[in-house]
Image (cartoon, rainbow, N blue to C red):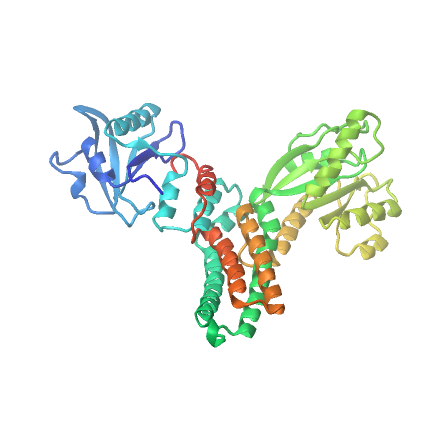
Amino acid sequence: MINNDTICALATANGMGAIAVIRVSGPEAISKVAQIYQSKFNANKSLTDAKSHTIHLGFIMDGDTIIDEALFSIFKNPHSYTGEDVVEISTHGSIYIQQKVLELLNKIGIRNANPGEYTFRAFWNGKMDLTQAEAVADLIASDSKASHEIAIKQMRGGFSNQIKDLRDQMINFAALMELELDFSEEDVEFADRTQFYALLNQLQNILKRLADSFAFGNVIKNGVPVAIVGAPNAGKSTLLNALLNEERAIVSDIEGTTRDTIEETIYIEGVGFRFIDTAGIRVAGDSIEKIGIEKTFEKINDASIVIFLYDANITEDDQIAQQLDELQGKGKIVFNVANKIDINNTTAVISEAIRQEFKDVVHLEISAKDQFNIDALKDQLVYQMKLKGSNQDDTIVTNSRHLEALQNTLIQIGKIKQGMDNGLPGDLLAMDIREALTYLGHITGEIDVDQDILGTIFGKFCIGK
């Protein structure tokens, strides 16, 4: 439950700017703010008489003292972000003015909002469901075109609508199953078991596809991890610097210079890539280098893309084949990148035998030092992620809470099917169906959600949202 009081907070970023917006929401939002408002053009005009979705120029008054000249935007319930009466005060961006207005609002009985309280009220008042509310936080945090597009789709209800549709279909069958219990003595079946079994198969396929999309959605949301691996002196640090277009990593002829992993993020065509320069793979010369090499293997396991980089002038095909075999076995997108082709002044150093044996690997020949083919490498990175994304359903799951609920629903559907195969009576089947519906309802908040879960979700928001 929410407190039926009126709240306020700074809706724009902290600090000085051209303007600042202070948001007030609650049953007394308009009447309270009216106490500190004075129209610039008509001293007798009150905000309490204002129509919804109108803007009013006036002064913020502390008694007889003018604090600032501001715009007062009025949104009356239920046609506002929170579903309550809302006033947004657009002031000049002075930090002093911001603090003074908030103090003034507190003084007249408006309390400061908690993190995420505005969006929580929007959820509570039915303006959005839980997945859409979570998408608001994702939208605010999105730092790439790709993560922004996923958040927008979810905020507009793409994921919610799909889950609601699946849940409604299950509810229809559950209702018929429950009805059978009232006529147990007559031994009748209202729910067509064949139809229901077909629906369960359909649900399994859709839910599994949604759950499988999490791996892709999560890396898009947080940046695609790309591990650059290879032998010492293969040019990994030089490649990282070339990709970043700056001297980020130390480059040296001495083997084993990189003792720890170095991570940097760049955005290519709207997709964030987290490049990880790792220690060279070889027998460690000392304990510190050994730790660095152990971290290399950890980063390979965590990466979505692995760039195997090697010196084209000294690396034999059997060495290349061995490394590619190992990397392909880990289920990653693998790049086979021959470096230092400037030394032999050739662009055809990857053998046809390697290309034929590893057709699913991306093969490229580059000179990290001269930045030759670096753009081609970037293009391939984007292409491979778009290719992977094209294999996903239109709806992409990015939230671990949703993933857990989907997985739990799949487990329950498996139990329902097993029960039907074993001739389980309707009352026991109905219990498993209700359990599956509960998990689906947890995703969108259509059933009661634990207050601790809601606190965790909305506690991640900034104060003014």
Tell me the quarter of the image containing the C terminus. Answer: top left
Q: Tell whether 225 sits left or right of 319.
A: left
Counting from the top left corner in percent of width and height, residue 168 is at: 45, 63
| Residue 294 visible somewhere in the drawing | yes
Residue 212 image offset from top left, x and y in percent? 61, 54
Total marks in image: 0
Q: Give whichever of 319, 135 is nearer the camera.
A: 135
Q: Is residue 394 above or below residue 262?
A: below
**Drawn side of residue 6 relative to residue 453, left or right:** left
Foreground pick, 153 / 442: 442
Residue 40 vertical placement versus 326 (above, below): above
**Left or right: 438 as drawn, with respect to 304:** left
Q: Residue at 60% across / 56% down in the picture? A: 411
Task: Please tell me in which quadrant of the rendered image residue 20 appears.
Answer: top left
Q: Quadrant where the N terminus lies?
A: top left
| Residue situated in front as seen by the camera: 430 or 195 | 430
Looking at the picture, how far across and down is residue 110, in whole percent? Answer: 27, 32
Residue at x 53% of width, y 56% of height? 395
Please provide percent x and percent y for residue 460: 47, 37
Q: Is residue 369 visible?
A: no
In the picture as drawn, the residue positioned furthest to the front comes out as 185
Residue at the image point whose x is 54% and y is 64% from the top:
429
Of residue 90 and residue 377, the one placed in the foreground of this image is 90
Q: Residue at x 72, y 27 (%)?
A: 250
Residue 67 sits in which quadrant?
A: top left
When the figure is inspected, residue 190 is found, relative to residue 305, above or below; the finding is below
- The image quadrant that residue 463 belongs to is top left
